[in-house]
Amino acid sequence: MISKCGVICASDCRAFGTECAGCNELEGRVSWAEFYGSSHCPIYACVVKKGFETCAECGLAPCEIWYSTRNPDASDEAFAADLASRLRNLSAITSR
């Protein structure tokens, strides 16, 4: 199960299985979206608005929305690793 932004919920998301059933299953209505003044994840909403399945189809990832939704508790190194992981995951699904 891969989210619109390339997170593999089961392995990459600490909230999966406890407070989150998965971004796609929740149609982007994740609990943390409220921190951005929204009911939906801004990345999820963008992908749906553009009519894509994932950010991979857009070709702009990581975009400003990715940077604006950065976990404020993450170090620069952790954030860079997260971006790299998500981009690898997206690349893997587009090369199938």
Image (tube, rainbow, N blue to C red):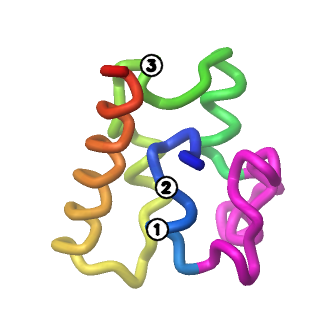
- What residue type is disc 1 on? Ser
Mark 3 and mark 1 in contact? Answer it, CB < 8 Å.
no
Q: Please give the name of the residue rendered at 42% of the width and 77% of the height, measured from the top-left corner.
A: 72
Query: Where is the C terminus found, in terms of image quarters?
Result: top left
- Residue 21 in magenta stretch: yes
- What residue type is disc 3 on? Cys
Q: Describe the element under mark 1 as helix, strand or loop.
A: helix
Q: Residues within 10 Å of mark 2 (few under 14, many from 20)?
A: some
Label drawn at residue 11: 1
Mark 3 and mark 2 in contact? Answer it, CB < 8 Å.
no
Give x and y (percent) for residue 11. Answer: 46, 68
Q: Please give the name of the residue rendered at 34% of the width and 79% of the height, measured from the top-left corner.
A: 74
- Residue 28 in magenta stretch: yes
Compared with 13, 86 (above or below) is: above
Give x and y (percent) for residue 9. Answer: 56, 61
Give x and y (percent) for residue 16. Answer: 64, 72
Compared with 28, 34 (above or below) is: below
Res. 32 image quadrant:
bottom right
Task: Tell me the magenta residue range.
Answer: 15-40
Mark 1 and mark 2 in contact? Answer it, CB < 8 Å.
yes
- The residue carrying mark 3 is 58
- Give the alpha-carbon distance from disc 3 to disc 1, as whole Å: 24 Å
- The residue carrying mark 2 is 8
